[in-house]
Image (cartoon, rainbow, N blue to C red):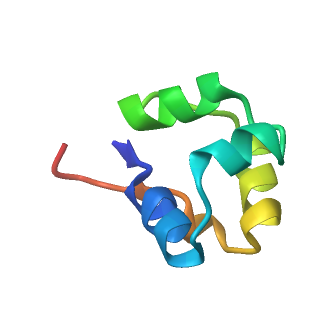
């Protein structure tokens, strides 16, 4: 299963809030909701998040075999 745990850790490390992503960067609240619930998002969205956060894909998602 894909986990977005690294994404939330990256936000904490960079001191960026979800509010900032929604209102300053244009990421939809629905996307963040889906990530909180572990639901799929598009690779385009992952690419956009990597660009905004200046990070690698592995800083956004990971594959968790235990779930």
- Locate the C terminus by quadrant: top left
Between 43 and 20, the one lying in front of the other is 20
Q: How many marks?
A: 0
Q: What residue is drawn where x is 47% and y is 68%?
A: 12
Percent x, y of residue 51: 82, 63
- 22 left or right of 38? right
- Locate the N terminus by quadrant: top left
Percent x, y of residue 66: 16, 51
Q: What residue is drawn where x is 71% and y is 50%?
A: 20
Q: Height in image: 55 above or below 44?
A: below
- Please tell me in which quadrant of the rendered image residue 23 appears: top right
Q: What residue is drawn where x is 80% and y is 61%?
A: 52
- 22 left or right of 61? right
Between 42 and 51, the one lying in front of the other is 51
Residue farthest top in this picture? 30
Percent x, y of residue 39: 45, 28
Q: What residue is drawn where x is 50% and y is 77%?
A: 13
Percent x, y of residue 30: 61, 22
């Amino acid at each position: 299963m894909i986990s977005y745990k690294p994404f939330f850790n990256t936000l904490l490390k960079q001191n960026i809030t979800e509010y900032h992503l929604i209102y300053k960067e244009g990421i939809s609240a629905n996307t963040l909701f889906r990530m909180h619930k572990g639901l799929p998002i598009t690779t385009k969205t992952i690419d956009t998040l990597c660009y905004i956060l200046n990070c690698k894909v592995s800083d956004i998602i990971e594959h968790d075999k235990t779930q």
